[in-house]
Amino acid sequence: MPSKNDSSIVCPSCGANNASVTASGRCIACGARMGSLAPFRDSELDRHRRYQQEGFSILWCLIALVLQSVLTAALVGGLPMIVQQLDFEGSNGMIVAIPVWFIGGVLLGMISPGKTFLEPVVASFLVAIPTVFYLLHSQTVRTMPLFMYVIMALIGVLFTLIGSYLGERIQMGPPAKPAD
């Protein structure tokens, strides 16, 4: 983990930057001994930190919202206007929206600079609300009750989470192999 200045020491226990090791040899943030903890930082701890969300980014949530909105509007709303044989009204629209949100999650996971799992999920949830109402009001033949739309939208949001995790894994590459 890079630090802000080259002379700082990163605590192997909590990850805090210490300007220098104090006289007691302890971290200024958590109080852990700096020297005694270094050998115990193993690959399991690195693996645990590798797959954790680093924080919520409003910018990436907005990017995710735009991407998910464009993909959903283009495939669920716009594609049937161009290709008349495709009719994504009602339940068919939700069946198409679920993989669209999954693909959006994968794309966002692949292009985001950090570990972003929540941003695509929040964006998909926000896109799912108008999508449900649009498909509910446009249904004529393939009718479905509102609660089924809500359930399918939640499944789509879950698939977005899976897709964003998969995209992050693709971006990070395989985990480092432990030294034997």
Image: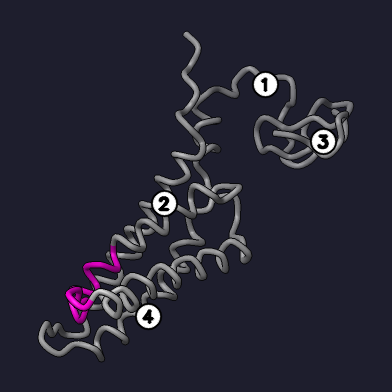
> Under tag 1, what secondary structure?
helix
**For the residue marked with disc 3, what is the amino acid?**
Asn
Q: Which residue is mark 2?
A: 106
Q: Nearer the viewer, mark 4 or mark 2?
A: 2
Q: Nearer the viewer, mark 2 or mark 3?
A: 2
Q: Which residue is mark 1?
A: 38
Q: Nearer the viewer, mark 4 or mark 3?
A: 4
Q: Which residue is mark 3?
A: 18
Circle 1 residues within 10 Å: few <14, some 14–19, many ≥20:
few
State the CA–CA distance, disc 1 to disc 4: 49 Å
Q: Is 88 colored magenta in this rendering?
A: yes
Circle 4 residues within 10 Å: few <14, some 14–19, many ≥20:
few
Q: Which residues are magenta?
A: 84-98
> Under tag 2, what secondary structure?
helix
Say which quarter of the image contains residue 13: top right
- For the point 86% across and 35% down, the residue is 5
> Under tag 4, what secondary structure?
helix
State the CA–CA distance, disc 1 to disc 3: 14 Å
State the CA–CA distance, disc 4 to disc 3: 46 Å
**For the residue marked with disc 1, what is the amino acid?**
Ala
Say which quarter of the image contains residue 128: bottom left
Q: Which residue is mark 4?
A: 129
- For the point 13% across and 85% down, the residue is 143
Q: Between disc 1 and disc 2, whose residue precedes? A: 1
Residue 124 appears at what percent x and percent y?
41, 68
